[in-house]
């Protein structure tokens, strides 16, 4: 279990704790104003200067000696910020997430997510690739806020969906190759399951390119049954993290466990049932490595 | 490796230019590492704050640029310059 499970999981994984989805929690933290402000200015979060620095050229800034280390601490502190009063809606304060497999996503959507549930455009993909795709599933008060912002709302489609439909949509996205991820916004309130891809996703960008802990790896890791693998390479094309590679001499794939986020997307491509997810703690070398 | 500098001429594209990036965004589509970010321009008082009208493109992650020049070739306004 990760640190956030210890703090907000009540003995379970953080995203399995029903309290974190409740309208009461949103009310207690006075999130309606905060999230409205944040989502009205959502596209400017990477551009706005924070303490004189914006994210433009972040990769170069992080490489600067000493200053780079200070920036890293400030950014991570901001993203993980828990003090409600000190949070600034113009930044992504308290907004981070974790990769989840489809099964966990379905449990969230069927039992935990607060109504109403909507599906709206992914802003990361629009800002970074110019594609509008309705793949973000939001719940609770965030749904009501996003419904008022026309640029996020798909046209000619029902935006509000029921639990059954939400689960179905998530499965569709997952099988297509998008990674399911669940998001604190702001911690400890959970209001979204996204279907991300790398490098378009803002969170995965910061994690994969700059090693900032905006997205944590899943509580699971992939396990390959070497005898079942026939070397068809279908799973290689599914992995967003280049964690799977085909090796001709042994005619099967190998897995780079350091790169595996445990999203389980590769399983959809395997005809021989050779890939399965196991809890991260069962894999001694990777227990605790999120 | 030296720093990559990507400069967009905002008199050709963006909130002051004749092209609205929300209609064009060809550079976003061709960029494999997704260097560009299309965003609401700062400093505008929007008539409808729920639906902003002023947008521009910023090369926000130059450190992942592979210098392939696809964006320079794709830009119909020839607004992108890359140097290092």
Image: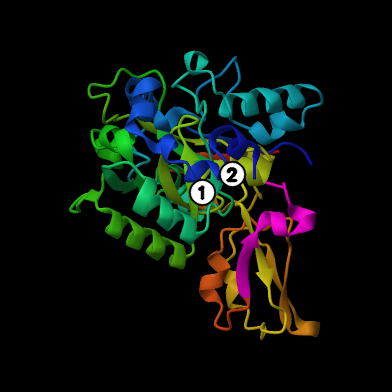
Q: Which residue is mark 2?
A: A205
Left/right of residue A16 with respect to residue A263 in the rendered view: left
* Region rendered in magenta: A275-290
Task: Label 2: state its secondary structure.
Answer: helix
Marked residue nearer the N-terminal end (2 or 1): 1
Which of the two residues, A171 or A205, is positioned nearer the viewer here? Answer: A171
Find residue A200 and name its label. 1
Asked whether residue A52 appears in the rendered view, the answer is yes
Which of the two residues, B12 or A72, is positioned nearer the viewer here? Answer: A72
Left/right of residue A187 with respect to residue A163 in the rendered view: right
Neighbourhood count class around disc 1 (C-alpha, 10 Å): few under 14, some 14–19, many 20 upward: many
Residue A51, horizontal then vertical, whole percent: 59, 14
- Disc 2: host chain: A
- Disc 1: host chain: A
Asked whether residue A132 appears in the rendered view, the answer is no
Query: Which residue is painted at 53% across and 75% down in the image?
Result: A269
Find residue B56 and name its label. none
Instruction: Tell me, yes or no, whether the two marked residues, 2 and 1, touch with CB atoms within 8 Å.
Output: yes
Query: Which residue is painted at 31% across and 46% down in the image?
Result: A120
Residue A259, horizontal then vertical, whole percent: 70, 56
Alpha carbons under labels 2 and 1: distance apart = 7 Å
* Mark 2 and mark 1 on one chain: yes
Query: Which residue is painted at 23% across and 21% down in the image?
Result: B47
Residue A281 is inside the magenta segment: yes
The image quadrant of residue A19 is top left
Q: Is residue B57 above or below residue A31?
A: below
């Amino acid at each position: 279990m990760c640190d956030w499970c210890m703090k907000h999981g009540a003995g379970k994984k953080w995203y399995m704790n029903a309290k974190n989805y409740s309208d009461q929690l949103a009310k207690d933290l006075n999130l309606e104003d905060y999230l409205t402000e944040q989502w009205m200015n959502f596209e400017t979060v990477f551009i706005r200067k924070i303490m004189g620095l914006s994210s433009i050229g972040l990769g170069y800034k992080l490489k600067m000696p000493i200053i780079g280390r200070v920036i890293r601490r400030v950014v991570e502190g901001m993203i993980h910020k828990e003090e409600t009063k000190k949070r600034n809606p113009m930044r992504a304060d308290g907004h981070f997430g974790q990769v989840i497999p489809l099964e966990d996503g379905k449990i969230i959507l069927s039992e935990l997510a607060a109504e109403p549930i909507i599906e709206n455009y992914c802003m990361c993909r629009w800002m970074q690739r110019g594609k509008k795709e309705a793949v973000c599933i939001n719940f609770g008060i965030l749904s009501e806020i996003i419904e008022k912002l026309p640029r996020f709302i798909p046209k000619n489609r029902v935006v509000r969906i029921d639990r059954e439909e939400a689960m179905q949509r998530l499965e569709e996205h997952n099988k297509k190759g998008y990674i399911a991820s669940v998001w604190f916004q702001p911690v400890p309130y959970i209001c979204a399951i996204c279907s991300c891809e790398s490098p378009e996703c803002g969170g995965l960008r910061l994690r994969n390119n700059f090693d900032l802990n905006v997205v944590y790896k899943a509580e699971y890791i992939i396990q390959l049954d070497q005898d079942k693998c026939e070397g068809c390479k279908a799973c290689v094309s599914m992995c967003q993290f280049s964690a799977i590679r085909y090796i001709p001499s042994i005619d099967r794939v190998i897995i780079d466990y350091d790169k595996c986020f445990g999203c389980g997307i590769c399983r959809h491509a395997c005809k021989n049932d050779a890939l399965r997810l196991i809890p991260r703690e069962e894999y001694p070398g990777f227990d605790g490595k999120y | 490796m030296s720093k990559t500098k990507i400069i967009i001429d905002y008199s050709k594209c963006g909130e002051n230019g004749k092209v609205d990036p929300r209609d064009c965004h060809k550079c976003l589509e061709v960029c494999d590492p997704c260097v560009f970010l299309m965003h609401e321009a700062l400093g505008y008082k929007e008539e409808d704050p729920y639906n902003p009208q002023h947008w521009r493109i910023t090369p926000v992650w130059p450190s992942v640029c592979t210098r392939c020049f696809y964006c320079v070739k794709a830009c119909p306004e020839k607004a992108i310059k890359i140097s290092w």
